[in-house]
Amino acid sequence: MLVLFTVIGGNAQVSMDSSFSVLLKDKIFETSDVSMMVYDLTADSLVFSHRANKLVRPASVMKLLTSVVALEQLGEDYLFKTQLYKGVGNDSMNYYVRGVMDPLFDEEDVVRLATAVSCGTVIDTLFADCSFCDPLYWGPGWSWDDSPYGYQPYLSPLMLCGGAVEVVVKPVERGKAPVYSCMPSSSFYTIINEAECGNPELGKLSIMRDWLEDSNVIRITGNCTAQKKERLNMYKSADFFMAVLAEKLDSIGVKVNNIAFGKTPQQCDVVTTVSTPIADVLDEALMESDNLCAESLVYHLSAANGATPATLKHGCSIIDKFVKNRLGIVCDYSIADGSGLSLYNYLSADILLKVLKYAYNNGTVYTSLYSHLPLSGVSGTLKYRTKSGSAYKKVRAKTGTVKGVCSLAGYARSSNGNMLAFVMLNGGMQSARPVREWQDKACEIMCR
């Protein structure tokens, strides 16, 4: 019986290997390529490898590496703390908001800060303390023409709703201007609605900020025939944060005479603290592929390792040390940010597989990482993939997509119960859809 099981296991591996070899003959590889590895973590053996050392832009699969390092160095109990302080003595009429780039700070959190101040209070100056990190608001290698969109915000220690506004436009009667709503609502930005319903001569509906002018004017133009939603970043995120906070304070009877930028004095009283658990940040970074969450983790790695102010460059150097010292990588690669937005990021399937193996062999890191990864056919960015078949609910993985790159990496449960780690870095394509279909077929092979 022992020999029989050995033969079956061997045949299964040969079958998987041959199936992948056939899959690599797909016509998409007439114009594109893939760096790929599959490893059986349970059996501790390599299953398949193809161009595993080729350097490829990882796109959002970069978030796997960022998250593993953050879990190891910051820990599962880490908190992102935004604090409101009140001055003492001659400074008692001033309040200070010290930000730490909490990527999930939202309108409810603004209300928490505002309601901590007694009604009837007159604040002489409300200070924005942005000393947590450097003033660079974009990462190296970020595309300048991604600027207006919410997935590439202007980085700052004070981020509200990810530094972006969500605009929803809905059609009404033909010939009339569509209706719109914005979240969060604020006088910080201006909406100009020049669109019309049922007029095809106006072209496609557009919702766009005047980003080339560094303006927070949002224009709605074109023909509105169906509901459309757009998430646009705000120029100067900290200013946006402070404007909304001042408006919330005013709405509850607190007067703010001035808004300024300045560091919190050492002698101050804490009025309130709004905390966000790292688990929530990881969930958004991995499950929903939120770029700000990933970049915030890098800045907090920098701060936790003594940088004052924290910098993206220093945070990336912490990740680089992890790759060299923990994973033992000596080959060339490039880490420029934590989210995968940068054009300067280059990793290989071999490096990312070592990240997945490292996590798997470190219980607390693996448990947390695995729980935050999208589940095939069920959640996150894998919700609408492999809705049926052998890979349904059997894959936990991170997706990544930028122009010319479509990647997928994570864990898969094979039919014999073994846990597999896999990496697929596809590059050189113009359309991601056929590549995703190809990757789903690969997941089917691993799970059946």
Image (cartoon, rainbow, N blue to C red):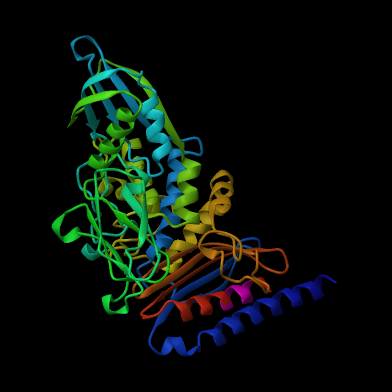
Residue 314: % across, % down: 27, 45
Q: Residue at coordinates 31% horizontally, 22% vertically from top-left?
A: 85
Q: Residue at coordinates 32% horizontally, 23% vertically from top-left?
A: 253
- Overall secondary structure of the magenta stretch? helix
Q: Residue at coordinates 45% horizontally, 66% vertically from top-left?
A: 350
Q: Is residue 442 magenta?
A: yes
Q: Residue furthest left?
A: 213
Looking at the image, residue 237 sits to the left or right of residue 347; the answer is: left
Q: Residue at coordinates 53% horizontally, 78% vertically from top-left?
A: 437
Q: Is residue 370 visible?
A: yes
Locate residue 256: give its quadrant. top left
- Give whichever of 11, 392 is nearer the camera: 392
Q: Residue furthest top?
A: 89
Q: Quadrant of the N terminus?
A: bottom right
- Give whichever of 169, 93 is nearer the camera: 169
Part of the protein shown in magenta? 441-446
- Give whichever of 154, 20 is nearer the camera: 154
